[in-house]
Image: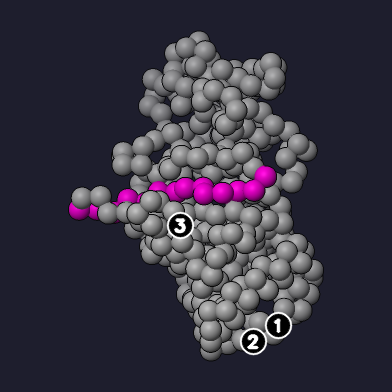
Amino acid sequence: MPVPEISADADQQETLNRAVQEVARLLRGARNNALDTEALAATLGTDALTIERLGQVMERNGLVDLIYPSNVLAKTQLKLVSRDEYSDRARTGIPGLDEQVEGGFERRSVVLVTGDSGSGKTTFCLQFLVNGAEKYGEPGIYITFEEKKEDVFRRTKRFGWDLEKLERENKLLVMEYPPHEIERFISEGQIIEDTIHDMGAKRIVIDSVTSLALVYDSEYKRRQGVLKTLETLKKWGCTALLTSESRLTAEGEVKARFGMSYLVDGVIYLYNMRRGDRRVRAFEILKLRGISHSMALCPLAIENHGVVLYPNQPVFGDFGAGGQKGF
């Protein structure tokens, strides 16, 4: 079988074709469902990173169930996990992420996606929804307080995402609440809950919770409003991502507004750092309750099809296509 989605010159292609078959055979018979990729790479005359990429390709093409580098096993091992074992995971489908979080976010969890301006928070969250709708049969709802609906449709087309089509197919719903209508969102909780049930939504994004909180006229009321929103999200039973502004202290501690980092199940920080005469994006998981996750900072690029993470590369190295395509 030809190898999809992997760049190789003509001299490497035969090795890669053989590797697909060999990885599939060895993964299915590997002791403890783990495969030593360095040993396999030596046998095939290629490198361990290529084998990891092949494993991910096979997973996407249905040859095996779920593959990811285990946090428990050596870095040069892959782990094969049945879908039943991780049925409580909401897979993101974002390249380089699921293998860092044991296959995906916990279902019905609330994860805060925060970080620097221009770091790709909105793109990250929309990609989570689009992949859920297109790849995993999980409809989603995107609630925006900062973008017009037609602007969201237009800007996401650059990634090949047709949100209008997904709406027509009842796989995605974009709900727009301009700043002067945020109080309407607060009063329409039951309508949104009914919509979730009617379309069978499993995922929801609120972009951003900062805008939502600012409708209140005191810090105390804002904190109470955020807390009520989190309780409502738990009641709705969807896997939820919230975007928010925050700042990073000199000690590297994230200071999210309204104490949100203590209230949610997970916190992801996206960086947009200056490095010399350019900016570099990076990704970090600060916490994910109930999941053994990577503790390393890793490069993030926004490429032709959305966000891509590069967990095996240094943050300040050369990686990805890395254009300034996010919003």
Mark 1 neighbour class, 10 Å CA radius: few under 14, some 14 to 19, many 20 or more:
few
Q: Does residue 258 appear in the picture of this structure?
A: yes
**In the rendered image, which quarter contains the C terminus?**
bottom left
Quadrant holding the N terminus: top right
Residue 52, position as x, y percentages in the image: 52, 28
Kindly identify the amino acid type of the residue bearing the numbered disc 1: Glu
Who's the residue at 46% across and 67% down the image?
245
Mark 2 Cα within 10 Å, few/some/many (few <14, many 20+)?
few
Say if mark 2 contacts mark 3, CB within 8 Å. Answer: no
Task: Indicate the amino acid at tag 3.
Answer: Val
Compared with 238, 191 (above or below) is below
Q: Residue at x 46, y 44 (%)?
A: 309
N-terminal label among 1 and 3:
1
- Does 288 appear in magenta? yes
In this figure, which residue is indicated by the disc labeled 2? Answer: 184
Tag nearer the camera, 1 or 3: 3
Residue 254 is marked as 3
Going by the picture, which residue comes out furthest to the bottom?
180
**Mark 1 = which residue?**
188
CA separation, marks 1 and 2?
Answer: 6 Å
What element does badge 1 sit on? loop
| Side of 169 relative to 95 (left or right) | right
Q: Is residue 325 left or right of residue 84?
A: left
Q: Residue furthest left?
A: 277
Please state the horizontal and vertical placement of residue 182, each as a whole percent of the image.
58, 84
Residue nearer the viewer, 276 or 11: 276
* Closest to the observer, 319 or 287: 287
Task: Name the spot of residue 298 as percent of width and height, x first.
Answer: 43, 42
In x, y percent, where is residue 231?
Answer: 71, 68
Report the magenta residues as a range: 277-290
